[in-house]
Image: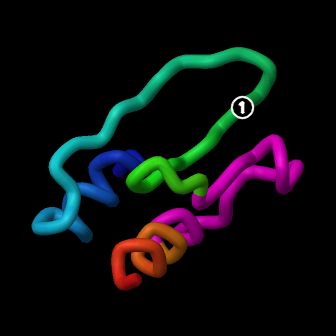
Amino acid sequence: MSLANDLLEKFEPEIESVALIPSDGGRFEVLVNDTLVYSKLQTGRHADPGEVAGLVEKVLKK
């Protein structure tokens, strides 16, 4: 299952859409309501399974 599908299934009532935007330089960033919740460039690593969903959940519960 892709990250986008996982997020849409888990947060269906809260998420209206998910956009995947190609980039270069190894960038992988996840923003929720214009808030950066995960950045591969900042962490220097790929996200662990479930990590991004957990971070999204924290932002949505605020």
Find residue 30 and report its horizontal and vertical position in percent: 54, 48
Say which of 17 and 44 sits in front. Answer: 17
In the rendered structure, the answer to whether residue 42 lies left or right of residue 50 reads right
Q: Is residue 58 magenta?
A: no
> Relative to residue 25, is residue 29 drawn left or right?
left
The C terminus lies in quadrant: bottom left
- Residue displayed at 36% across by 83% down: 61
What residue do we see at 35% from left, 74% from top? 60
* Rendered position, 19 above or below 31: above
Q: Quadrant of residue 53?
A: bottom left
User: Which residue is at 81% across, 42% downward?
Assistant: 41
Exactly how many numbered labels are in the figure? 1
Q: Is residue 49 magenta?
A: yes
Please, what is the three-letter code of the amino acid marked with disc 1? Arg
Q: What residue is shown at x 43% (from left), y 55% (from top)?
A: 32
Return the residue at label 1: 27
**Residue sitting farthest toward the right:** 44
Q: Position of residue 49 (x, y in %)?
A: 57, 66
In the depicted structure, whether residue 27 falls above or below residue 2: above
Instruction: Give the secondary structure at mark 1.
Output: loop
Residue 42 place in picture, x, y as percent: 84, 50
Residue 60 drawn above or below residue 19? below
Q: Where residue 23 sits in the image (x, y, percent)?
A: 62, 18
Q: Which residues are magenta?
A: 37-53
Q: How is the image coloured?
A: rainbow
Instruction: Looking at the picture, tell me which residue is in the foreground, 58 or 48.
Output: 58
